[in-house]
Image (cartoon, rainbow, N blue to C red):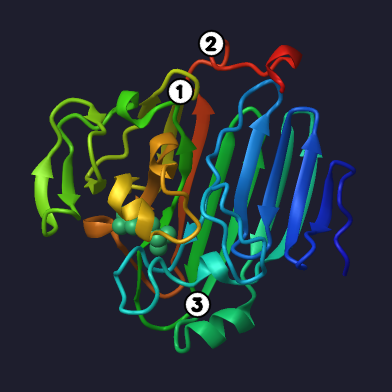
Amino acid sequence: MTLVLPDCIRHSRNQAGKAFIDIAHPAVSARIALEGAHLLQCTPSGQAPMLWVSPDDPQLPGKSLRGGIPLCWPWFGGDRPQSAHGIARRAPWQLSAAEQDAEGVYLRFELPADCIAEQLPGEPWQVHVEYRLGAAIEVQLTTRNLGEQPMKLSQALHTYLPVTAIQQARISGLDGAAYIDALDDWTHKTQAGDIDFTGELDRIYYGTSAAVQLHDAAHPVVVERQGSESVVVWNPWQAKSLRLSEFPANGYLGMLCIEAANAGPDARLLQPGESHTLGTRIRPANPAAAHVITQDSVQ
Ligand SMILES: O=P(O)(O)OC[C@H]1O[C@@H](O)[C@H](O)[C@@H](O)[C@@H]1O
């Protein structure tokens, strides 16, 4: 049965045939690629864009754009020898629900069972993702084990956030938290004070579900998490920027990632029939003080 979409939500395609869902609601505008059910843009009315997205856009089906919130599932990073971050971010998801109300929109996407069977043989997962977009971004990724054996799940909502200048950005909320330093032979360490950025940084903080705050002149946000005792913080810095796909050489100056996760020691073992929801809510820390787009500031 064809899904009837509210007026503010429509399907679109770029010239190369890549499919998107576009949202133009009085409270929020947004774009989601069906490939990966990948939230690429989200701009609450009167605010600056909440997500960073690379200007190097291959615009091609099968080539994921770097930025927004890629879904890393059902493994995070190099937890398995196959391609990093699992299969979900390049898979063909299907829109299964779309609603609007005065506050914003609700969308739900499913990863079809035949796609899971083909790409993850012998792993009977069921997975869907829900977005609630308005003054804030809410994402919930729900996984169920439909099999008869326990299955291991690691995952992340790989959120790219814009910053005014990386050297001035700061993250609070993780003082005293344990982390794994991916750049120092996966050594376990303890965070002292806030996180600031003076070089490449790639860490899995674990044992905490506390909200994390990004302090930035124009893009201060609070990142809350659900079903998540780990959060990944990442900036590639200069040398790695040159090696990354779909990433400009100086891209690291204007972004960082704060990823609600089940990673490292927070990977989950789902028993037969069990389901787990990983969620995040990203909201402007101080909407009144955040950069407001006015006609004067539009070039
Ligand atoms: O290049 P990818 O596969 O999108 O990964 C980007 C980064 O994703 C982060 O989550 C990892 O911690 C980094 O190690 C990795 O480099």
Q: Is label 1 in contact with label 2 (beta carbons under 8 Å)?
A: yes
33 over 220 or under it: above or below:
below
Q: Is mark 1 within 8 Å of ligand 1?
A: no
Image height of 104 relative to 118, above or below: above
Decide: few, some or many residues near mark 3? Use Cα within 10 Å; few <14, some 14-19, many ≥20. Answer: some
Residue 215 visible here: yes
Residue position marked by numbered label 1 in the rendering: 220
* Residue at x-position 20% and y-position 55%: 182
Q: Name the kind of residue labelled 3 in the image.
A: Leu
Q: Residues within 10 Å of mark 2 (few under 14, many from 20)?
A: few
The C terminus: image quadrant: top right
Residue 271, relative to residue 184: is it above or below?
below
Is disc 3 placed on a helix, strand or loop? loop
Mark found first going from the N terminus, 1 or 2: 1
| 118 over 281 or under it: above or below | below
In the rendered image, residue 113, in percent from the top left (x then y), is placed at 61, 79
Q: Secondary structure at mark 1?
A: loop
Left or right of 25 on screen, residue 238: left
Q: Which residue is mark 3?
A: 146
Which of the two discs, 2 and 3, labels the residue nearer the N terminus?
3
Label 2, label 3: how far apart the Cα atoms are: 47 Å
Q: Which residue is nearer to you in this view: 280 or 88?
A: 88
Question: Looking at the image, is mark 1 or mark 3 nearer the viewer?
Answer: 1
Identity, as a three-letter code, of the amino acid under mark 2: Ala
Give the residue type at disc 1: Pro
Pointer 2 residue = 289
Q: Nearer the viewer, residue 240 or 266?
A: 240
- Residue 4 image position (x, y, % from top left): 89, 56
